[in-house]
Amino acid sequence: MSVGSLNWTAFCAESNEYGLDKAAWAESVCKALGSASYSPYADAPTWLQMLGSGVFTMVWTSFAAFLIAFFLGSLLGIIRTLPNKPLAFIGNCYVEIFRNIPLIVQLFFWAFVFPEFLPDSLSSGSGDIVAGGWWKNILNTHPAVIGVFALGLYTAARVSEHVRAGISTVSRGQKYAASALGFTTGQSYRYVVLPVAYRIVWPTITSEAMNVFKNSAVLYALSVLNFFAYTKTMREETSQDIVILILSTPVYLIITYGIKFVMAWIEKRMAVPGLGSGGK
């Protein structure tokens, strides 16, 4: 089958989704392509618009999850290197648990198991007082919130390991110099240890940022209508597997390379000659 013989107008066909108002940009694209399958009188938006909405959901959920992972992972990485053994033990336990359980299992845990341990409250779905009713309400109305929370906690364990490794590579001489200047432990980390550690491990954190984006596809398991969820639905409804995969693959590549370039720009901006990666 040649590429030219594929049914590219499938993207301009009426979808079976009614959650969005029809967007002018999608209709304009279909008109410009001269799609015979586009109908301005269709009630539902085109598949092209639904895929665009899925891309937006995929990007913002990934970004939000990465923010959670970066800040929580940094905090965990720091406490795991402190002389306080109870705090270090808590951090190590967190990493061992979250890093060794598959993401899909953690998603189901936060969605269906965790609320059973919460106090009883009103569930808007059933109208009854049930365990974790308010949590279940969020899952039913805004599943992306639960998905972002779970993905952020999962990735935080991985970021923590990178930050811990970066802190461990900072030379003792720099730490002793900070102590000699009268810095407290907090000041030593803020002004000496962390600036060096982040420069060292930033390339690995870049990899985690890209992994968060790719792992966000799994959030469809919680009914998060992201790009993967819509491509899956469109494949089932139209049977245009080749056309859809030809479009979806470049979308993932473009966004992941965009993340790579942004993180590389940040790395270049914070590089110090002779220190960490990127210095010359």
Image (cartoon, helix red, strand yellow):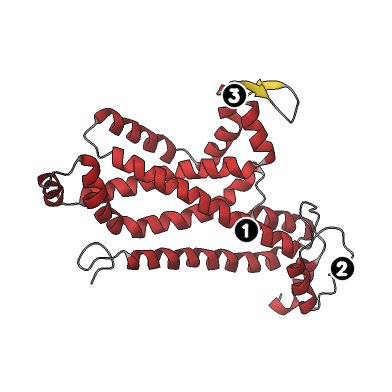
Q: Up-down: is 8 above or below 45?
A: below
**Which quadrant holds the C terminus?**
bottom left
Q: Earlier in the sequence, mark 1 or mark 2?
A: 2
Residue 69's place in the image compared with 244, above or below, is above
Q: Nearer the viewer, residue 202 or 240?
A: 202
Badge 3 crowding class, 10 Å Cα cut-off, few under 14, some 14 to 19, many 20 or more, is some
Question: Based on the displayed image, in which of its 4 quarters is residue 38 positioned?
Answer: bottom right
Callout 3 amino acid: Glu
Cα distance in 3D space between marks 2 and 3: 47 Å
At which x and y percent is residue 193? Answer: 23, 50
Q: Secondary structure at mark 1?
A: helix
Q: Which mark is residue 278?
A: none
Q: Mark 2 = which residue?
A: 40
**Image quadrant for the N terminus?**
bottom right
Residue under the point 59% across and 24% down: 116
Percent position (x, y) of residue 257? Answer: 48, 67
Say left or right for 110 vs 10. Answer: left
Q: Amino acid at mark 1?
A: Phe
Tell me the CA gap for discs 3 and 1: 32 Å
The answer to whether marks 2 and 3 mark residues whose Cβ atoms lie closer than 8 Å is no
Mark 3 — residue? 116
Q: CA distance from mark 1 to mark 2?
A: 24 Å
